[in-house]
Image (cartoon, grey):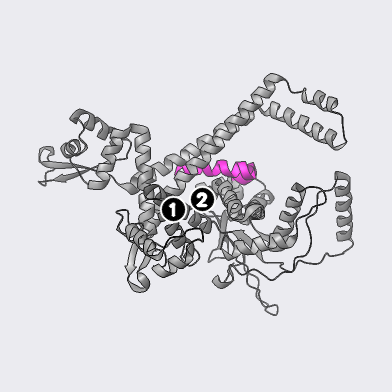
Amino acid sequence: MTQAELRLCSLLLQEHFGEIVEKVGNSLLRTGPRPLRLLVGDTGLLPDQVKKALCVLIQHNLVRYEVQPRGSVEYEARSERILRILRYPRYIYTAKTLYGDPGELLVEELLLHGHLPMSSAVARVANRLTETMEDGKTMDYSEVSNTFVRLADTHFIQRCPTAPESPRNTKAPPPPAPTLAIAEKDMYTVPRLSLHGKGKRRHSCDEDEEREHKAKKQKQEGGNSETPPDDGIYWQVNLERFHQHFRDQALVSAVASRMDQTSSEVVRTMLRMSEVTTASGASHTQPLSSNEIFRALPAGYNIGKQVLDQYLALLADDPLEFVGKSGDSGGGTYSVNLHKALVSLATATLESIVEERFGSRCARIFRLLLRKKHLEQKQVEDFAMIPAKEAKDMLYRMLSENLVSLQEIPKTPDHAPSRTFYLYTVNVMAAARMLLHRCYKSVANLMERRQHEMRENKRLLEKSQRVEAILASMQATGAEAAQLHEVEEMITGPERQQLENLKRNVNKIDASENQVDETIFVLESFIESTMKRP
């Protein structure tokens, strides 16, 4: 694990879970799998604090545990899962665009709590949606429940593995830690629940305190509230399925920019037909016949069968080979080559970065090396039509940044420079890894910058929050406009301007984080796909 990844993981844990959890997570990331005893010694925290931090990390799937042969339990941090926290806003926004407000809030609640039972998630979301509605209107549980079922049917959420029930009559001691497992057929099976009810609005503080007091009293008296029907069945967000959706979206937009909208719609239809049947790490989608694709096209696209066949032939003949023809049955069977699509997306990202950093002439040389694989310096000058001095300077600049590599091919065993060919080439995998490392570094810098901005303006932010709270309570009691205006003037003109600048800067940093994460996603997907290939 690189220093940049470690730093970013620490910042993410600190921002989302606080200092104690960050300390425990950082210790596991640095040292690898460890038992609780060593973890307590390394962090210098109380055993109870470490246990609670581990509970939080396990709840959010950021740490896994394993029982060792001697009976001890070791905990291991999942760095790749911690880095996914960076993509949470994108998961939530995708759920909103696909399934509306209930889908957005369901995914947000599941990400916020790590995992939840269906009944609890539906009740929470219904309450939150009711609060945003006008007085007198409420959100029905059944509507949120239907969205939950749709999310499970399309595999965006899945059931958490559970511990198998041990027989009660056995006298064997329980294992040090339960082994969690779930059958694949049950992962997306939603329990049949009859959730009846409507969302509730939050009550005033006094009513809340009174209700809590009653609940505590009932608990002390031994009164037990009835257990929910889906008790023990927990759900979590299926991040792999979201990644599959992001990859498909990137592929469709790439086809649209290269060809036209209709071609991209044909590819979108093919991906949609095979999105649930294709495994997340597969290099190809399931083969589909031309007739099947024609029947599945959206209603708005009035293109004939003959025109569709022409589009499919055009896509299959394209040099990028996004779509490949795999047979002639049913009017021809076609599949999307996901690996080649990811290679093209990663290569385009590298080209774009070279052009931004070194200019269009460097990008021309870079594209030339990608196409020709190996070239001598003289050949680069001739093919790129760039003067020798400039070409040499550009190649050395890219070489120093590890975007281009130099390969020596000696004519004789003594490796004499005068009798050796020096060929320039692009190792796409190595360049992608190097840029991914830089992206992690960039995101960590952006997060630190945002934290610095917030610290610098902490006093002003607290004052602004106090004024907003006073205004909200005065509006609730029906205060006059003059009184409200008087409270608003507690924040002076220069302070208001400072707050506007802070808001603008933080928004810019957030947008930059999301843009860098898009590049991280493309590079990670390409590296993962290449590593899985035989």
Describe the element under mark 1 as helix, strand or loop: helix
Please state the horizontal and vertical placement of residue 352, each as a whole percent of the image. 37, 39
* Residue plotted at (59% across, 53% down): 95
Sequence order check, earlier mark of 1 and 2: 2
Label 1 vs label 2: CA separation? 30 Å
Of residues 122 and 441, which is closer to you in this image? 122
Q: Which residues are magenta?
A: 1-23
Is 429 on the left-hand or right-hand side of 125? left
Q: Which residue is mark 1?
A: 252
Does any portion of residue 158 appear in the rendered image?
no
Q: Residue 270 is drawn in which quadrant?
A: bottom left
Residue 142 in view here: yes
The amino acid pointed to by label 2 is Ser
In the image, what residue occupies the spot 46% across and 65% down? 278
Looking at the picture, how far across and down is residue 22, in whole percent?
60, 44
Figure check: 337 above or below 498: below
